[in-house]
Amino acid sequence: MEAENQTGISEFILLGFSEEPELQPFIFGLFLSMYLVTVLGNLLIILAISSDSHLHTPMYFFLTNLSLVDICFSTTIVPRILVNIHTENKAISYMDCLTQVYFSMFFPILDTLLLTVMAYDRFVAICHPLYYTVVMNPRLCGMLVFITWFIGVMTSLLHILLIMHLTFCRDLEIPHFFCELTHILKLACSDTFLNSTLIYFMTGVLGVFPLIGILFSYSQIASSIRKMSSSGGKQKAFSTCGSHLSVVSLFYGTGVAVYFTSAVTHSSQKISVASVMYTVVTPMLNPFIYSLRNKDVKGALGRLLSRSASCLW
């Protein structure tokens, strides 16, 4: 393919998973099932928290935002996979691909920052309980969520603006099931130094530093819990932190797995499987983690389902 301006590119080709025809119905059914569970599970969390006045607290306000982000993240990836399998057409337009790149960066950034904010919320609640309502007031909570969205919007937009100045002169086949930033950069024939530098810089700022903040918060939380004399207080502290810590471990664990899989292997199949864990499985499991490990959420879900059943009958 001759070198051409980026405006001359009409589409990319998403190679996806296996090309064997007999596997396509299974892959379609698997992703459709996971997507429906993700949307339903996170939607139930949002409805349960919204309908229960006891859960109108900063911790559950952030959880509602996290569930919304998980729905949107999964929606960015899975419907396109289903359409491609159903139509047997792997092409994706240039603008649709850039849109997918944008949101596939935007929502993980929100996930990272929201998990950090939630760790700070638990830090204040356990280490400084007397000042909790003063510190975590509605204005601060709203400001923290606004800042996370603003950072996500501007960071993702900066990446897209840099991509739009690239030219592509190679085979435009993407060995992945969605338009992922690093795969797009590999297809460029112009200099991608600025793009790569921005990736490394933002990974450090929005990946490593939030993780350091989370670890610091939990080190202080662990110290405070050890000083508690009441076993009931310790158990309550563990219950409020356990769900969040499990989600953090799952999110960062799958993210690191994708990174190391990409670094040690050139197999697109292995990279795709690791990416499925990060992009699809993690958003699906989050509502189960919070509902199974959190008595307040389980109670709210039970009351919501009871009201829904009574309305139907």
Image: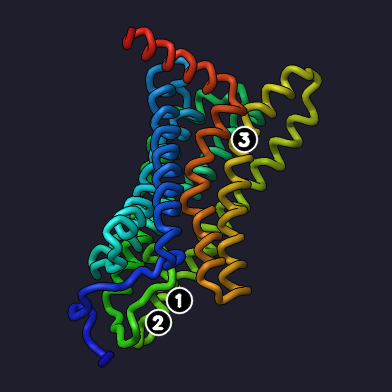
- Res 146 → quadrant: top left
What is the spatial separation of the Cα atoms under label 2 and label 1, in whole angstroms?
6 Å
Q: Is residue 91 above or below residue 147?
A: below
Res. 98 mark: none
Determine which residue is flagged by label 2: 192
Q: Secondary structure at mark 2?
A: loop
Q: Is residue 244 above or below residue 180?
A: above
The reply to whether dot 2 and dot 1 touch (C-beta < 8 Å) is yes
- Res 169 → quadrant: bottom left
Q: Residue at x 55, y 31 (%)?
A: 290
* Amino acid at circle 1: Ser
Q: Residue at x 46, y 34 (%)?
A: 62
Q: Secondary structure at mark 3?
A: helix
Determine which residue is flagged by label 1: 196
User: In this orientation, which residue lies closer to the viewer: 129 or 211?
Assistant: 211
The image shows residue 256 at horizontal and vertical percentages of 60, 60
- Location of the N terminus by quadrant is bottom left
Residue 57 falls left or right of residue 4? right
Q: Is residue 234 above or below residue 27?
A: above
The image shows residue 210 at horizontal and vertical percentages of 56, 52
Res. 123 mark: 3
Q: Is residue 290 above or below residue 38?
A: above
* Amino acid at circle 2: Thr
Q: Secondary structure at mark 1?
A: helix
